[in-house]
Image (spheres, grey):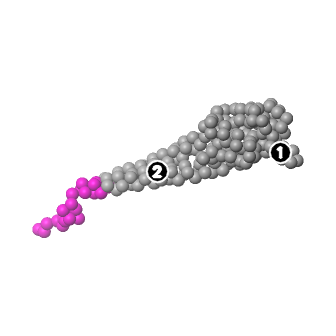
């Protein structure tokens, strides 16, 4: 009687544990790659979201300054307060604070908490003096001259600050979902390899 042919595993001299080791190496590699891609994706998304957000808040500061010329000129603090409260409510947790001053630099109204108060005050004073728009280095604090009348005279200025913490939280949540998906795929592949 002839002996039964050896299985591929027996012929190659490999043990069944080799398949498990390969599956484990594959799973670990997939986990590491997923972590790397999640970190790179989070960094790129965060940078892009911050840039887009800074452009949006710049445009919002422009629009707010244009809308309140008459209210600042005639010191209509009720209208100014209503505008700032609406700005705060419309932007939710992304809104930091705002201050409106008249041409003499006297505060007409202020809401919320302005980030980087000394630098923000200097930014506001410079904008009031020059009439040029100003922004912090990160773009999250914006100062605009408020103009009124036919000659578009400077009648005051507005300073608005935002926070990008909400964006950071959203980006981190997205990265965690990506990492979780990658981990699930790696674990599934590892389990299949061991089966």
- Does residue 44 appear anywhere in the picture? yes
Q: Is residue 98 left or right of residue 11?
A: right
| Secondary structure type for disc 2 | helix
Q: Nearer the viewer, residue 102 or 48?
A: 102
* Residue located farthest toward the left when viewing the structure as drawn: 1
Residue indicated by mark 2: 39
**Residue at figure coordinates x 18%, y 62% from the top left:** 13
Residue indicated by mark 1: 153
Q: Is residue 17 above or below residue 113?
A: below
What is the x, y in percent for residue 188? 39, 51
Give the mark, 1 or 2, whose residue is nearer the N terminus.
2
What is the x, y in percent for residue 42? 50, 50
Instruction: State yes or no: discs 1 and 2 in contact (Cβ < 8 Å).
Output: no
What is the x, y in percent for residue 40? 47, 53
**Residue at figure coordinates x 62%, y 36% from the top left:** 118
What is the x, y in percent for residue 66? 79, 45
| Secondary structure type for disc 1 | strand
Q: Which mark is residue 93?
A: none
Quadrant of res 16: bottom left
- Does residue 93 appear anywhere in the picture? no
Q: Is residue 191 above or below residue 80?
A: below
**Magenta stretch, residue numbers:** 1-23
């Amino acid at each position: 009687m002839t002996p039964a042919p050896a299985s591929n595993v027996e012929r190659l001299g490999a043990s069944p544990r080799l398949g498990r080791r390969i599956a484990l190496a594959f799973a670990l590699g997939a986990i590491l790659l997923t972590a790397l891609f999640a970190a790179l994706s989070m960094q790129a998304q965060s940078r892009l979201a911050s840039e887009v957000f800074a452009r949006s808040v710049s445009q919002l500061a422009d629009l707010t300054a244009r809308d309140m010329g008459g209210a600042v000129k005639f010191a209509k603090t009720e209208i100014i307060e209503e505008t700032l409260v609406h700005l705060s409510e419309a932007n939710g947790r992304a809104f930091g604070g705002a201050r409106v001053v008249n041409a003499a630099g006297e505060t007409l109204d202020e809401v919320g908490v302005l980030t980087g108060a000394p630098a923000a005050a200097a930014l506001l004073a410079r904008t009031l003096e020059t009439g040029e728009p100003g922004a912090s280095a990160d773009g999250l604090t914006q100062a605009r001259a408020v103009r009124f009348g036919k000659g578009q005279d400077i009648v005051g200025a507005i300073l608005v600050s935002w926070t990008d913490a909400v964006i950071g939280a959203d980006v981190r949540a997205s990265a965690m979902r990506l990492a979780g998906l990658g981990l699930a795929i790696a674990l599934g592949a590892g389990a299949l390899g061991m089966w």
